[in-house]
Every structure is written in C-alpha cells, then in structure tokens.
Amino acid sequence: MVSDRTPFSPQPALVKEDKPESASSRQPVQFYLGPYNEGAIEKPDSLAKVTGPCGDTMEISLRVEGNKIIESRFQVNGCAVSRACASIAAALAKGKELEEAWDIDEGQIAAKLQSIPEDHRHCPVLARDTLRQAIEKYIKQSRCKR
C-alpha cells in the first residue's frame, strides 16, 4: 500500500529534544531515514539507470499520463546521500508536467537536504541526471509510437 504522506508534509519528531523542532528542520533527516517513493514501478512508462562517478547506481522509473508524471519511484545501490537525493528528485517530479520536471536541478534537490558533505556534492547531480534521462527516454519512446 502506498502512503499519501509526502516528504514535504510535517513529520513527527524522531528524537525528543528540549527545544521545539520545526517540520523543516526534521525534513532532511526524513529523506535519509525514511525515503519516499522507494521501489520500482511495475511496467513503467520510462526507466533510467545511471551510475555516478562514485560508483553509486541510481534508477528512476516514471508513469506518465498525457504530459504529466503521475508516479515516480527510485532505487539506489549506493550511499545514504544518493538515496536521499533520488527520493527528493522523485518526489519533486511527481505531479509535474514533463517540461517542469526536466527543469528540476541539483540546486533544488540539494536545498531540500539543507547540508551535503563536500565529498557527496555529486549526488544531487546524479539524481538530476537520472531523472532527466528517464524523461528523455519517455519523450523518445512517445515519438517512436506516433
């Protein structure tokens, strides 16, 4: 069963602290500990698999109706930062027109995490590239069917 919960909705606190915690301060932790949209789409309209310079492999699958991404899911064989970035890319793409989703960039993905270690700055780029490859494959496949 798929949850209606989104990564951008308020989440319960993971650790009890003395100071109040905002939903935005918990959000990055949620992407690391409980990524959204993880898994494969059965019979996707498009699927892209990209291996980054670090060796992490990211896969994003899409289900498209008309010109709109109605479902996006990911799988990652790699580090927690790659996993979080793929989760964010998939979440940002869902519900968007293809052109809007194409415009999602590494800065938008990185901003959702608030902080990325220097040696993992390539992870949002890998997520962007994988998402764009999935969109590009869908567009090419759609043109071939005409």
Image (cartoon, helix red, strand yellow):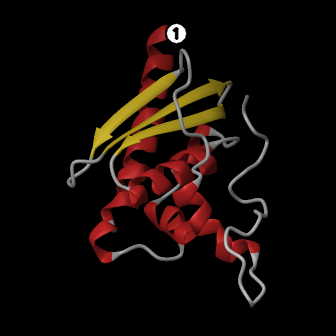
Which sits in the foreground, 133 or 111?
A: 111
**Is disc 1 surrounded by few (<14), some (14 to 19) or many (20+) residues within 10 Å?**
few
Task: Tell me the residue at 37%/47% (across/down).
Answer: 129
Asked whether, in this view, residue 3 is left or right of residue 82, the answer is right
- Above or below residue 121? Residue 105 is above
Task: Tell me the residue at 55%/36% (across/down).
Answer: 73
Could you say whether the residue bearing mark 1 is in a helix, strand or loop?
loop
Which sits in the foreground, 95 or 86?
A: 86
Asked whether, in this view, residue 134 is left or right of residue 96, the answer is left
Task: Tell me the residue at 51%/61% (across/down).
Answer: 109
The amino acid sitting under disc 1 is Arg
Residue pointed to by mark 1: 146
Direction top: furthest residue = 145
Which sits in the foreground, 2 or 48?
A: 2
Residue 61 at x, y percent in the picture? 50, 30
Task: Tell me the residue at 73%/50% (across/down).
Answer: 6
- Above or below residue 121? Residue 144 is above
Residue 4 at x, y percent in the picture? 79, 41
Quadrant (top left, top right, bottom left, bottom right) of the N terminus? top right
